[in-house]
Image: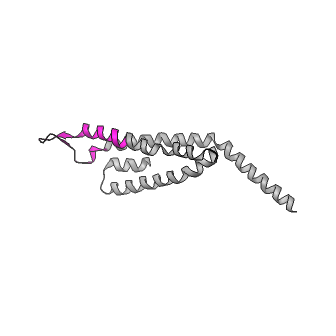
Amino acid sequence: MAVGYILLAMALPGSLYIGSIVVGICYGVRLAITVPTASELFGLKYYGLIYNILILNLPLGSFLFSGLLAGILYDREATATEGGGNTCVGGHCYRLVFIVMAAACIVGFFLDILLSIRTKNVYNKISMSKKSKKSLGTSSSQ
């Protein structure tokens, strides 16, 4: 996702389309893996609550990045017009916003790596229990 945001920040011809496609695909994959990840790591007892907490980042991130950060940085880049408003034309208007979002994605990537290292034992236990159930099923049917 960070690569997509960097492409958007570069504002080269066609980078809007390619960057948007990359970010959209990554966003869709992230939403798709949230469901099984939540159920595998935390179980199904309080699944609704846990899933909603994990999905809370969507409106929260939208508010923080699109509402606050993008608005503040756009106003900083914009020039005042005679009618009393601000205007900004060009790729520089949102460049810093995309760079900040790319940095947030890079931090998230490293946190995902940390999560995968910390949950390696959980997945090993799941794998071992499936193997032991298979071997018990095979030996009892013989």
User: Considering depth in this image, is 31 or 101 the residue closer to the camera?
Assistant: 31
120 shown above or below 25: above
Q: Give the range drawn in magenta.
A: 65-94
Quadrant location, the C terminus: bottom right
Residue 113 appears left or right of 90: right
Q: How is the image coloured?
A: one colour
Q: Identify the residue at image location x=22%, y=40%.
A: 78
Examine the image and state in which quarter residue 112 appears. top right
Outermost right residue: 142
Residue 44: x percent and y percent? 63, 48
Task: Give how far across and how far down residue 6 sits, in percent.
Answer: 38, 47
Magenta-span inclusion, residue 83: yes
Q: Going 74% across and 49% down the picture, which residue do you hit?
A: 128
Q: Where in the figure is residue 95, as x and y percent of width and height?
A: 31, 44
- Hey, which quadrant is residue 16 in on the image? bottom left
Is 70 on the left-hand or right-hand side of 136?
Answer: left
Q: In this view, does 130 lie above or below 54?
A: below
Q: Which of 110 and 135 is in front in this view?
A: 135
Where residue 71 appears, as percent x and y from the top left, is 30, 40
Asked whether residue 111 is drawn in magenta, I would say no
Q: Is 89 on the left or on the right of 107, as rendered?
A: left
**Which residue sits furthest bottom?**
142
